[in-house]
Image (cartoon, rainbow, N blue to C red):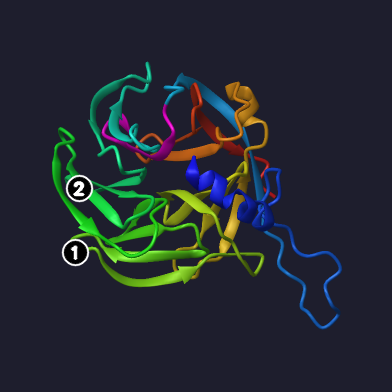
């Protein structure tokens, strides 16, 4: 909640109140080259599943028949293995009450998670969610995903930072750009077919990023999905992307959403 109060003004400046990422500036100067159009995709709902409406979803991924979810809010942050059909937690581990949980990702037989502020990260054993140890990093933590052998971290800026997941040594970073402009407020991350997919906080957009260059190759416009989920709370924004690579299923949800959706992309132009 604190994060929303502090950052909502910045988010409003960086992104429009509707679904799409920032559009090119109107009437560019004659000397300025035209900015490239960014392709847009729509969506259709394939299936709807229950989701815990008390979960402030921060991280989501799919592995071996189950969803794994990391949630936020002080005193309520947890890591959980979920049953897709019921949305219920089959196993869970709570974070310390003074930590605000953020993104999670799988690395080998571990789950690695970050927290919002304080630079504290955690490792858990994948099979039973038992803690394996902590680590430190600079700056904020928002979303995480694995790209090849690298762990990629978003931190609210336009930069994606790359780490060695074994040591959490920072290796480099790229700046994410939408139509040539830096794009901030990148939140939950997922890797799909070599692209990084990122929720853009306080919007209904998921951007698809080339991890080598930071260029947004296209975006998914999920306008109307929060209304379908039946949420009206301004904090109940889209956040959470999970990819079932074996069955090619794409799942999305949001903070405090009572539903989780399997979707397919449509009308990509």
CA gap, disc 1 and disc 2: 12 Å
Residue denoted by label 1: 167
Q: Is residue 69 visible?
A: no
Query: In front here: 202 or 149?
Result: 202
Q: Is residue 176 left or right of 69 when viewed as pictured?
A: right
Q: Is residue 12 left or right of 159 when viewed as pictured?
A: right
Asked whether the beta carbons under mark 1 and mark 2 sit within 8 Å of each other, the answer is: no
Q: How crowded is mark 1: few (under 14 residues within 10 Å), some or many (20 or more)?
A: few
Which span of residues is magenta-colored?
A: 55-70
Q: Looking at the magenta stretch, what is its main secondary structure?
A: strand
Q: Which residue is drawn at 49% across and 47% down?
A: 3
Q: Can residue 231 be seen in this view?
A: yes
Query: In front here: 16 or 97?
Result: 97
Q: Quadrant of residue 69?
A: top left
Residue denoted by label 2: 123
Query: Where's residue 99, x and y in %?
Result: 31, 44
Q: In this view, does 173 lie above or below 131?
A: below
Query: Where's residue 204, x and y in %?
Result: 62, 41
- Residue farthest top in this picture: 86
Q: In which quarter of the image is residue 118?
A: bottom left
Q: Is mark 2 on a helix, strand or loop?
A: strand
Q: Is residue 132 left or right of 269 when viewed as pictured?
A: left
């Amino acid at each position: 909640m604190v994060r929303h109060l502090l950052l909502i003004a910045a988010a409003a400046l960086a992104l429009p109140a509707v679904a799409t990422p920032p559009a090119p500036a109107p009437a560019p100067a004659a000397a300025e080259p035209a900015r490239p159009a960014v392709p847009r995709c729509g969506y259709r709902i394939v299936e709807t599943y229950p989701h815990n409406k008390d979960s402030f979803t921060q991280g989501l991924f799919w592995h071996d028949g189950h969803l794994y979810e990391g949630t936020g809010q002080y005193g309520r942050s947890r890591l959980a293995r979920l049953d897709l059909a019921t949305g219920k937690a089959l196993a869970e581990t709570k974070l310390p009450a003074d930590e605000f949980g953020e993104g999670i990702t799988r690395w080998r037989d571990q789950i690695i998670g970050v927290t919002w502020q304080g630079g504290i990260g955690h490792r858990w054993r994948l099979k039973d969610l038992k803690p394996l140890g902590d680590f430190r990093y600079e700056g904020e933590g928002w979303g995480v995903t694995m790209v090849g052998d690298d762990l990629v971290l978003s931190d609210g800026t336009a930069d994606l930072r790359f780490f060695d997941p074994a040591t959490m040594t920072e290796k480099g970073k790229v700046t994410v750009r939408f139509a040539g402009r830096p794009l901030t407020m990148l939140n939950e991350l997922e890797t799909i077919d070599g692209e990084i997919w990122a929720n853009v906080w306080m919007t209904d957009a998921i951007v698809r990023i080339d991890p080598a260059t930071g260029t947004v190759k296209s975006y998914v416009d999920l306008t109307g999905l929060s209304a379908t989920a039946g949420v009206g709370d301004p904090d109940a924004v889209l956040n959470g992307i999970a990819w079932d690579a074996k069955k090619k299923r794409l799942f999305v949800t949001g903070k405090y959403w009572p539903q989780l959706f399997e979707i397919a992309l449509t009308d990509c132009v």
